[in-house]
Image (cartoon, helix red, strand yellow):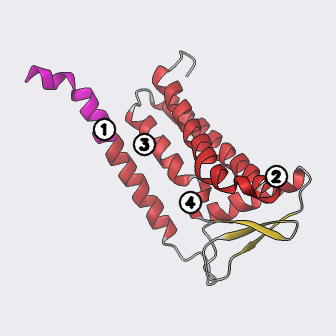
Amino acid sequence: MSALRTYVPVFKFVATFGVIYIVLSLIYYLYLQQDYNSSNYPDPVTSQVSYQTQQLLNAIGYNAQISNVPHHPSVYMYLNKTVVYRVIEGCNAISVMILFVAFVLAFAKAWKKTAFFILFGVTFIYIVNLFRLVALAIIKNKYPQYDHISHDILFPAVIYGSVILLWLIWVKKPKHI
């Protein structure tokens, strides 16, 4: 019985993480079930991510345009009047942020520091995701032969690698965090 007590913190962490992850995922699922308008355009976060990606591409000299995909909750991203990809709900990084938040909350001790780190981490993930979408558009436009490896391997590694880096920082918790 005493051997099990050794693992109580691990069981507590896993249970806490699981409950928080499920609750946040259900809230996000309910958010996605809303009818945002009669044309079934994407949810506001996906729309905002698409718009900001377009703005960043334009700021660095590309001719980027976006348009809602008719009858599908997604946004076309155009570079030089050619569709380079479709931004769907999974491209907004919310599910990655939920994973991040659940982990940090499961490891939480001081709520003020936890809230600050969550705000910092979610903002960091959001920015990394925007740059991921910008880089993906450029690669798809200029180097289409690297489309598969960049979309399916490189960029998931970047976004999840960022989350793992944040988790490591949280677990190590330097005194200033």
Q: Secondary structure at mark 3?
A: helix
The amino acid pointed to by label 4 is: Gly
What residue span does the magenta drawing correspond to? 1-16
Label 3 or label 2, whichever comes before in sequence order: 2
| Residue pictured at 64% horizontal, 39% vertical | 124
CB under 8 Å between callouts 3 and 1? no
Label 4 or label 3, whichever comes before in sequence order: 4
Label 3 or label 1, whichever comes before in sequence order: 1
Residue 117 position, x and y percent, is 55, 32
Q: Does residue 155 sit above or below 76 in this rendering?
A: above
- Identify the residue under disc 1: 14
- Identify the residue under disc 3: 102
Q: Residue furthest top?
A: 175
Label 2 or label 1, whichever comes before in sequence order: 1
CB under 8 Å between callouts 3 and 2? no
- Identify the residue under disc 4: 90
In the displayed structure, does residue 1 sit left or right of residue 140? left
Q: Does residue 134 sit above or below 113 in this rendering?
A: below
In the displayed structure, does residue 14 sit left or right of residue 175? left
User: Dividing the image into 4 quarters, which one contains the N terminus?
Assistant: top left
What separation in Å lies between label 2 and label 1 (alpha carbons)? Answer: 39 Å
Quadrant for residue 9, please give it.
Answer: top left
Label annotation for residue 95: none
In the displayed structure, does residue 115 sit left or right of residue 20? right
What separation in Å lies between label 3 and label 1 (alpha carbons)? Answer: 10 Å
Label 3 Cα crowd, 10 Å radius (few <14 / some 14-19 / many 20+): many
Label 1 Cα crowd, 10 Å radius (few <14 / some 14-19 / many 20+): some
Quadrant for residue 42, please give it.
Answer: bottom right
What separation in Å lies between label 1 and label 4 (alpha carbons)? Answer: 25 Å
- Identify the residue under disc 2: 56
